[in-house]
Image (cartoon, rainbow, N blue to C red):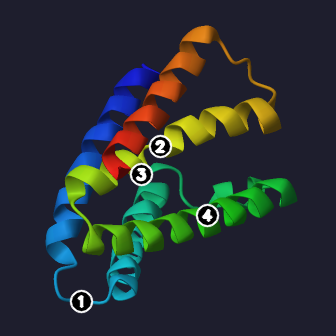
Amino acid sequence: MWWIYALLSALFAAITAILAKIGIKGIDTDLATAIRTVVILFLAWSIVFIKSGSPALSQLSKQNWTFLILSGLATGASWIFYFKALQLGKVSQVAPIDKASVALTILLSVIFLGETLTVKTAIGALLIIAGSFVLIF
């Protein structure tokens, strides 16, 4: 079942790139990121309150808070750079290079989470990196 969610994530990421490229035309990308963030904030909190309500907040540990905040900061930085890249470059180049994060995530998961690096996963990551270089140069 996880792969269905992953494919839906990829689909919406692709749609996001196209809509963002059109939406940032002629405006500051930081403003665009702020607007997008407010929309996501509203959507995410709506889902939380519809599904479970606020009592789930009291169940979060200090570790949950720390790493979710750090993840949010990393996401914000990613969006800011992504929108700037989209404004300056072609979606067909920026979006695939952004997905080089998949290869970096594989590497970081091995280093920090102790996940096993299989031959298949290593080859996939190398192909993603190679494809990114093809698009850059």
Q: CA distance from mark 2 to mark 4?
A: 16 Å
- The disc, 1 or 2, on the residue closer to the chain's N-terminal end is 1
Q: Residue at x 54, y 58 (%)?
A: 53
Give neighbour class at mark 3: few <14, some 14-19, many 20+ (Cα, 10 Å): some
In this picture, residue 14 sits left or right of residue 40 = left
Tag 4 or tag 1, which sits nearer the N-term?
1
Give the label on residue 27, or none: 1
Circle 3 SS class = helix
Query: Distance of mark 3 from mark 1, alpha carbons?
Result: 21 Å
What residue would you read off at disc 4? 74
Identify the residue shown where x is 37% and y is 64%.
43
3 or 4: mark nearer the eye: 3
Give the farthest residue toward the front: 137
Q: Is residue 2 left or right of residue 135?
A: right
Find out whether the residues at labels 1 and 4 contact each other: C-beta distance under 8 Å: no
Identity, as a three-letter code, of the amino acid under mark 2: Ala
Foreground pick, 22 / 87: 87
Separation of residues labelled 1 and 4 (CA atoms): 23 Å
Question: Contact (CB < 8 A) between labels 2 and 4?
Answer: no
The amino acid type of the residue labelled 1 equals Ile
Dot in front, 3 or 1: 3
Q: CA distance from mark 3 to mark 2?
A: 5 Å
Which residue in the structure is indicated by mark 3?
Answer: 98
Q: Are marks 1 and 2 in contact (CB under 8 Å)?
A: no
Q: Is residue 9 above or below residue 98?
A: above
The N terminus: image quadrant: top left
* Residue underneath mark 2: 100
Residue 54: where, in percent of width, then height?
60, 63
Query: Mark 3: which amino acid?
Result: Asp
